[in-house]
C-alpha cells in the first residue's frame, strides 16, 4: 500500500515537470514541422497524463522538506482538478492557433519553449497543497511568462515585460509576507477546506489577521488585475503575441484568482472572514475594478488593449463572487472563471487572426471585416455575447448566479450595489464589444474591402476558434456537463 | 598544530612567489592552485579532527594577553566555507589575471589572504582575532589597488581609512573584553559579570559592532565596498563577497555571541540600535542596487544588503537567528561568488561593464549566463533554491522577536527580496532577450561562442551546481550548522 501511495504521489509531479522538460526540448527543435509535431505531442500527452490525476482524492503528498519547517506539498482536490483540465484543454487548442500566428514572428522556438514551461508552472499552482508550493509555482509562472510578453522585442515590449515582472514580484511578495505572518496562526500548512486557523489564537488577533488578509488579497489580486495593482495588465497583455495574450488574459489571471480562493477558503476559512470589513473592502475593490475596466475599455481604440481592459473588468466579477462567501456566489464565480477563460481566449484569438490577416489593430479600422472574414467575426460575436451575458451563452448563467449569490449574501447596499454594477458593466461590455461586431458585418454603403485582404490563413487558425466558441455556447446551454465538477468544489467548502 | 600549518602555509607560499618568479603561467598556476588546495586540505583536516580541543597558545604576552588558536563550531563553519571556495577562486583568478598583469605580486597577497582569513577563523580570543583582522586589511590592500591607476589608488585609500577607523572602534571593544572578559571566546559570552556599569559595556559593544561591522558593510561603514569594486574580479568575488566581508560578519558574531554575550545585549537600546542599522542597510543596499547600472557595483550593493541579512539574524540574539544567519552566510557566499565570476567573465571576454551593454550576450556566453541565472534565481529566493530557506528562517527569527523592529525586519527582508528579483532578473532578461534591433539574428555557431576557458567556467559550473544542491538540502545544512555551533 505504501508503494502505491508513493507512486500516486510521484505521479502528481508528472503534469508539472513534463511540460517544463517538454518546453526545454521544444525550444531546441528548429525545423518548423518537427517542432509543431513535438509541441502537439507534448500537449496531447499532457492531457493523457492529467487524466489519471482526475481520479485522485485530494490527499496531500509531501515532496520536499526545505529548512525552517517549510515543505513542498502537492495534492489534487476538486478545485485543482477543475482548473487543470480547463488549462490543459485550452492550452492545447491555443497551440494550434499559435502555429499559424507565429509565422509572423521570429524566435519561435523560444516562444513555444516558454509556452510549454508556463503550462507546467500553472499545473504546479493547480496542484499545490500549501501556500509555499503555490508561491513557488506562482513565481515560476511569472518567470516563464515574462519572455512571452517581451517576445516581439520592441522597446514597448520590454517596458511592458519589466512592468509585468515588477508588479508580479511585488504582488507575490505581499502574498508571501501574508503567509509568513499567517503561519504562526495556522494549525497546519496544508490547504484544508474550511480553513486551518487556530481559532483560539486567531480570535485574539482578529483585526490584525484581517489586515493581513487584505494585504494577501491585494497581492494575489495583482495577477488577476484587481485594483490597485492592475496597472500592468493593460500594457502587458496587448504587447504579447496574440496566443500569449490569450493565455495571459484567459488563464494566467485565473491563477491569481485560484491563489485567492485558496487563501480565503482553504487557509482562513470563509467563516472567519464572513461579514468582516476585510471582506467588504475586497468586495469594494473588485467592484471598482469591474466598473473601471469596463469604462476604460469603452474609450480604447486599440482592440487588444480594449480586450485587456475587459479582462481587468471580467476577472473581478470572479473575485466579487468568491468574496461574497456563500455557495451560490462561489458557484457563479467558478462558472464565470471557466466561461471567461474560454470566451476571452476566443476573443484574443479572433483578434489575432484579424491582425494576422489584415495587419489592422484599431477598432476604428475594423469596418467591414466581417464581410471578408465571416467565420472569424462570427466567433468574435458569439464570444462577445458570452462576455456581455446574453443567453444561451455561458456568460449569462454565471452572471445570473453571481447576482443570486449577491442577494443571498444579504449585505445590504453592497449586495444591491454589486448587482447594479454588474448590470452597468454588462451594458458597458455590450457597448465596447457589440459595435465592433455590427461595424464588421454592416459597414455601410461606401465600404471598400480591397484593403482588408492582406494574407490568407489556414485551417489551423479557425479550428481553435470554432472549438472554443462551441464550448462556450454548448456549455452555456448544457451547464450540467460542468456542474458536477463545480458543485463538487462548492460542496467541499460549504 | 594543523591549524597553524593551515594558517601559515599559504602566507609563506605567497611570500615565496615574488622571490621565486616562476617562468611561465603554467608553473605559477600549478604552484598557486596547489598551495591553495594543500591549505584547504590542512584546514579541513583541522576542522574535522581538532574540534573542541584545548586552545593552542602561540605567544603569551602576559597573564591576560595571548595569541591563541582553537577550532570551535563557528570556526568549523567559516573555515570550511573559506577553504572550499579559495582553490576554486584561485583557478578562476589564474585565467582572469593573465590579462591584468603583475601576477606574482597578486597571487602572493591572494594566498596570504587565505592564510590570514583562516587565522581569523581559528582565533581563540579577541586579541588574536584583532591581530589577524588588521592583517587582513593590510594584505588585501594591494589586491584592491592592483591596477595601480588613479581610481584603484583612491579605492585603496578609502578602504584603508574605513578599515582603520573601524578597527579603532573595534579596539575599544577589544579593550573592554580583555579587561573584563575571560581568556578565550566562550559561547554565550566570556564577560565576568557585574564588574562594570552595564551601559558602559553596551557602549563598548556598540562601538565594536559598528567598528568590526565596517568590514561587514553595515551603514554607515559601507562605502568602501563600493569603491573596492574597481579591484580585479577575483578580488571582488572572493574577498569582497566572501572572505573580507564574511570576516567582518564573523567578527561581529564573535564579539556578540562569544565575547560580550547575547544576554547582556538582549532587550536593550544596543539591540534596537543594531536592528535599526541592519534594517536600514538591507533596504538601502537593495534599492541602490536597482538604481546602479554598473554590474560590479550593483553586485556590491547586493552584497551590502545580504550581509545585513546575516547580521539581522545575529542581531535577534536568539539561537534560531544565529543559525539562520550562518546558513545565509554560507548560501550567499556560494551564490555571490558565482554572480561575480559571471560578471568578471563578461568583462574579461567582452570588456563590458554596464547593464545595458549586456544585451544579447546570453547566447554568446551560454555557460557564463546560465550559471549567472542559476545563482540569480537562488539569491532572489525562488524556492526550492538556496536563498529561499535561509531568508525564510531569517524572517521567522526576526518576527519571533515580537517587537516592532522584529516585524520591520521581516518586512524589510521581503521588500529586499522583491528588489533583488528585479535587479537580478533585469540582467538575465537583457542578456537572453535582446530587443529586436540588437538581436543576434543568426544562430551562434559553437566556434563563435565567447565563453571563457575551462579555468573560469569550471569553478562557475561547480558553484552553480553547489548552489542548487545546497538549496535542496537546505534543511540538512541548517541542522548541521546548528549542531556545530550550538553543540
Image (spheres, rainbow, N blue to C red):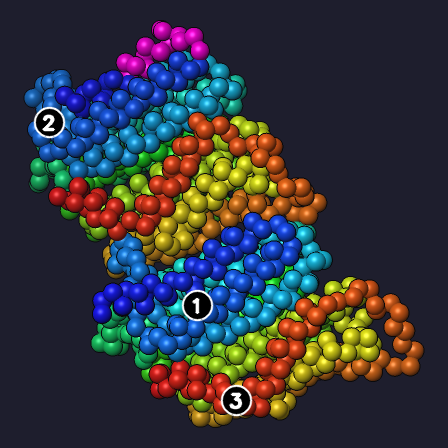
- The residue tagged 3 is A479
In front of the other: label 3 or label 1? 1
Confirm or deny contact between disc 1 and disc 2 (CB under 8 A).
Answer: no
**Regarding mark 1 in the picture, which secondary structure is present there?**
helix
Q: Which residues are magenta?
A: B11-24
Residue B49 visible (yes or no): yes
Q: Which residue is painted at 19% across and 28% down in the image?
A: B45
> Mark 1 falls within which chain?
A
Q: Quadrant of the C terminus of chain B?
A: top left
Where is residue A225, by image quadrant?
bottom right
Check the image and name the residue furthest to the right.
A446
> Residue A165, percent across and down?
53, 56
Q: Quadrant of the N terminus of chain B?
A: top left
Residue A29 position, x and y percent, is 58, 51
Question: Where on the picture, by quarter, is residue B361?
Answer: top right
Asked if marks 1 and 2 fall on the same chain, the answer is no
Above or below residue A143? Residue B291 is: above
**Residue A264 in sight here:** no
The residue at which mark 2 appears reads as B55
**Mark toward the start of the polypeptide (3 vs 1):** 1
Cα gap from disc 3 to disc 2, whole angstroms:
79 Å
Quarter residue A157 falls in: bottom right
Question: Label 1: how many residues lie within 10 Å, few (<14), some (14-19) or many (20+)?
Answer: some
Neighbours of disc 3 within 10 Å: few (<14), some (14-19), many (20+) = some
Horizontal relation, residue B117 to residue A228: left or right: left
Q: Which residue is mark 1?
A: A49
Amino acid at each position: 500500500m505504501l508503494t502505491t501511495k508513493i507512486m500516486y504521489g510521484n505521479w502528481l509531479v508528472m503534469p508539472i515537470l513534463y511540460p517544463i522538460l517538454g518546453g526545454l526540448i521544444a525550444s531546441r527543435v528548429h525545423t518548423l514541422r518537427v517542432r509543431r509535431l513535438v509541441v502537439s505531442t507534448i500537449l496531447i500527452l499532457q492531457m493523457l497524463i492529467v487524466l489519471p490525476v482526475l481520479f485522485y482524492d485530494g490527499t496531500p503528498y509531501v515532496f520536499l522538506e526545505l529548512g525552517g519547517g517549510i515543505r513542498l506539498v502537492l495534492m489534487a482536490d476538486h478545485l485543482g482538478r477543475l482548473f487543470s483540465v480547463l488549462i490543459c484543454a485550452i492550452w492545447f487548442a491555443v497551440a494550434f492557433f499559435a502555429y499559424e500566428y507565429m509565422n509572423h514572428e521570429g524566435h519561435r522556438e523560444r516562444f513555444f519553449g516558454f509556452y510549454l514551461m508556463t503550462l507546467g508552472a500553472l499545473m504546479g499552482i493547480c496542484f499545490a497543497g500549501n501556500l509555499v508550493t503555490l508561491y513557488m509555482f506562482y513565481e515560476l509562472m511569472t518567470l516563464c511568462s515574462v519572455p512571452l510578453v517581451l517576445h516581439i522585442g520592441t522597446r514597448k515590449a520590454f517596458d511592458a515585460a519589466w512592468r509585468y515582472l515588477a508588479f508580479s514580484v511585488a504582488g507575490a511578495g505581499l502574498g508571501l509576507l501574508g503567509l509568513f505572518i499567517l503561519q504562526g496562526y495556522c494549525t497546519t500548512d496544508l490547504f484544508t477546506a474550511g480553513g486551518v486557523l487556530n481559532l483560539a489564537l486567531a480570535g485574539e488577533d482578529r483585526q490584525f489577521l484581517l489586515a493581513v488578509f487584505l494585504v494577501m488579497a491585494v497581492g494575489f489580486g495583482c495577477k488577476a488585475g484587481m485594483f490597485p495593482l492592475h496597472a500592468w495588465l493593460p500594457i502587458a497583455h496587448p504587447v504579447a503575441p496574440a496566443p500569449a495574450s490569450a493565455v495571459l488574459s484567459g488563464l494566467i489571471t485565473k491563477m491569481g484568482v485560484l491563489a485567492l480562493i485558496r487563501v480565503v477558503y482553504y487557509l482562513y476559512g470563509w467563516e472567519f472572514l464572513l461579514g468582516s470589513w476585510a471582506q467588504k473592502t475586497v468586495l469594494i475593490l473588485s467592484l471598482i475594478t469591474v466598473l473601471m475596466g469596463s469604462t476604460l475599455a469603452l474609450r480604447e481604440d486599440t482592440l487588444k488593449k480594449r480586450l485587456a481592459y475587459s479582462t481587468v473588468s471580467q476577472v473581478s466579477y470572479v473575485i466579487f463572487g468568491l468574496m461574497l462567501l456563500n455557495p451560490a456566489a462561489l458557484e457563479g464565480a467558478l462558472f464565470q472563471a471557466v466561461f471567461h477563460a474560454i470566451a476571452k481566449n476566443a476573443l484574443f484569438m479572433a483578434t489575432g487572426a484579424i491582425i494576422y490577416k489584415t495587419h489592422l489593430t484599431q477598432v476604428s479600422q475594423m469596418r467591414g471585416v466581417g464581410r471578408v472574414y465571416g467565420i472569424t467575426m462570427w466567433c468574435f460575436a458569439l464570444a462577445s455575447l458570452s462576455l456581455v451575458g446574453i443567453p444561451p451563452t455561458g456568460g449569462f448563467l454565471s452572471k445570473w448566479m453571481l447576482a443570486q449569490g449577491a442577494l443571498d449574501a444579504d449585505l445590504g447596499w453592497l449586495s444591491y450595489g454589486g448587482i447594479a454594477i454588474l448590470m452597468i458593466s454588462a451594458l458597458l461590455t455590450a457597448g465596447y464589444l457589440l459595435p465592433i461586431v455590427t461595424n464588421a458585418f454592416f459597414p455601410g454603403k461606401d465600404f471598400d474591402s480591397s484593403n482588408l485582404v492582406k494574407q490568407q490563413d489556414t485551417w489551423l487558425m479557425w479550428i481553435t476558434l470554432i472549438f472554443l466558441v462551441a464550448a462556450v455556447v454548448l456549455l452555456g446551454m448544457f451547464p450540467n456537463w460542468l456542474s458536477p465538477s463545480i458543485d463538487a468544489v462548492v460542496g467541499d467548502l460549504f | 598544530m594543523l591549524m597553524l600549518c593551515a594558517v601559515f602555509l599559504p602566507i609563506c607560499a605567497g611570500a615565496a612567489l615574488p622571490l621565486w618568479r616562476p617562468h611561465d603561467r603554467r608553473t605559477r598556476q600549478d604552484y598557486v592552485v596547489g598551495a591553495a588546495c594543500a591549505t584547504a586540505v590542512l584546514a579541513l583536516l583541522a576542522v574535522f579532527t581538532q574540534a573542541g580541543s584545548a586552545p593552542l597558545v602561540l605567544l603569551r604576552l602576559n597573564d591576560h594577553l595571548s595569541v591563541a588558536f582553537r577550532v570551535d563550531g563557528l570556526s568549523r563553519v567559516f573555515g570550511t566555507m573559506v577553504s572550499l571556495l579559495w582553490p576554486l577562486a584561485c583557478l578562476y583568478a589564474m585565467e582572469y589575471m593573465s590579462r591584468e598583469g603583475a601576477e606574482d605580486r597578486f597571487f602572493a597577497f591572494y594566498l596570504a589572504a587565505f592564510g590570514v582569513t583562516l587565522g581569523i577563523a581559528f582565533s581563540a580570543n579577541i586579541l588574536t582575532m584583532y591581530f589577524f583582522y588588521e592583517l587582513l586589511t593590510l594584505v588585501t590592500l594591494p589586491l584592491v589597488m592592483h591596477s595601480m591607476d588613479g581610481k584603484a589608488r583612491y579605492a585603496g585609500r578609502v578602504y584603508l581609512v574605513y578599515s582603520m577607523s573601524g578597527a579603532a572602534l573595534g579596539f575599544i571593544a577589544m579593550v573592554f573584553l580583555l579587561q573584563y572578559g575571560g581568556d578565550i571566546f566562550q559561547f554565550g559570552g566570556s564577560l565576568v559579570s557585574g564588574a562594570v556599569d552595564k551601559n558602559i559595556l553596551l557602549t563598548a559593544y556598540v562601538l565594536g559592532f559598528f567598528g568590526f561591522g565596517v568590514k561587514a558593510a553595515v551603514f554607515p561603514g559601507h562605502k568602501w565596498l563600493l569603491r573596492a569594486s574597481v579591484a580585479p574580479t577575483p578580488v571582488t568575488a572572493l574577498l569582497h563577497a566572501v572572505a573580507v566581508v564574511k570576516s567582518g560578519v564573523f567578527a561581529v558574531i564573535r564579539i556578540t555571541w562569544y565575547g560580550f554575550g547575547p544576554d547582556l545585549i538582549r532587550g536593550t537600546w544596543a539591540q534596537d540600535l543594531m536592528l535599526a542599522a541592519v534594517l536600514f542597510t538591507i533596504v538601502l543596499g537593495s534599492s541602490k542596487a536597482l538604481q546602479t547600472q554598473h554590474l560590479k557595483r550593483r553586485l556590491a550593493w547586493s552584497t551590502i544588503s545580504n550581509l545585513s541579512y546575516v547580521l539581522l539574524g545575529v542581531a535577534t540574539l536568539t539561537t534560531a537567528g544565529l543559525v539562520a544567519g550562518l546558513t545565509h552566510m554560507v548560501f550567499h557566499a556560494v551564490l555571490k561568488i558565482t554572480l561575480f565570476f559571471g560578471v568578471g567573465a563578461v568583462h574579461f571576454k567582452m570588456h563590458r561593464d554596464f547593464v545595458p551593454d549586456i544585451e544579447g550576450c546570453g547566447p554568446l556566453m551560454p555557460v557564463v549566463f546560465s550559471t549567472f541565472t542559476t545563482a540569480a534565481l537562488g539569491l532572489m529566493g525562488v524556492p526550492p533554491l538556496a536563498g529561499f530557506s535561509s531568508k525564510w528562517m531569517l524572517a521567522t527569527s526576526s518576527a519571533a522577536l515580537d517587537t516592532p523592529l522584529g516585524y520591520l525586519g521581516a518586512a524589510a527582508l521581503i521588500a529586499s527580496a522583491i528588489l533583488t528579483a528585479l535587479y537580478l532578473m533585469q540582467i538575465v532578461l537583457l542578456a537572453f532577450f535582446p530587443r529586436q534591433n540588437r538581436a543576434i539574428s543568426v544562430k551562434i555557431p559553437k566556434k563563435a561562442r565567447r565563453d571563457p576557458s575551462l579555468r573560469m567556467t569550471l569553478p562557475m559550473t561547480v558553484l552553480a551546481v553547489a548552489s542548487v544542491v545546497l538549496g535542496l538540502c537546505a534543511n540538512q545544512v541548517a541542522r548541521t550548522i546548528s549542531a556545530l555551533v550550538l553543540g
